[in-house]
Image (tube, helix red, strand yellow):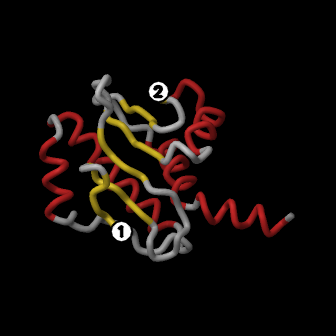
Amino acid sequence: MTAPKPPREVSRAFDALPAPIGKRLLQVRDLIFATAAAHGEVGRLTETLKWGEPAYLTDETGSGSTIRLGRLKDSEHAAILFNCKTTLVDTFRERFGDQFEYRQTRALLLPLSGALAKQELTVCLSLALTYHLDRRRKRQRR
């Protein structure tokens, strides 16, 4: 699945990033849309800006937690940012350990060069895009 053309304001936000960071995050953007398309329960994504950064929401189904793309002030890495009140980054740490660099409970940092760890990132993005579904299922099993 090819990602749709981003809204103008989102495109501008990518363009405003340093080129290597923008390029890496556009690769992640493609992966977000491909991962969402592979999960029928996720539905159509809303692509918008949150805090001036590209953000991906599951407004249609409420299945997941917001994913933002950007960078952290003290880092030269591309950053995939998650709601710090979720357990997502802790889960990524448990599953993938040193595969990624993390920042507290809010970010997964990516190097700007080399191959993107697509398989592992797809798992992380899938967990984020279905975060609320998974929590609802756990509650229903109790």
Image marks 2 and 1: residues in contact by CB distance under 8 Å: no
Residue at image mark 1: 46
Measuring 38% from the left and 62% from the top, which residue is drawn there?
A: 33
Residue 47: horizontal and vertical position, in percent? 31, 64
Q: Is residue 44 above or below residue 65?
A: below
Which disc number belongs to residue 80? none
Which of the 4 quarters of the picture holds residue 113?
top left
Q: Is residue 70 above or below residue 111?
A: below
Specify the amino acid type for callout 1: Thr
Residue 139, how many percent across, how many down? 78, 64
Q: Quadrant of residue 142?
A: bottom right
Q: Nearer the viewer, residue 18 or 40?
A: 18
**Any mark on residue 101, and which?**
2
Q: Residue at x 41, y 61 (%)?
A: 34
Image quadrant occupied by the N terminus: bottom left
* Residue 36 percent across, percent down from the top left: 46, 64
Q: Position of residue 135 (x, y in %)?
A: 69, 60
Front tag of 2 and 1: 1
Is 26 on the left-hand or right-hand side of 60? left
Residue 71, picture quadrant:
top left
Instruction: Identify the residue shown where x is 46% and y is 59%.
Output: 35
Q: Residues within 10 Å of mark 2 (few under 14, many from 20)?
A: some
Amino acid type at image mark 2: Glu
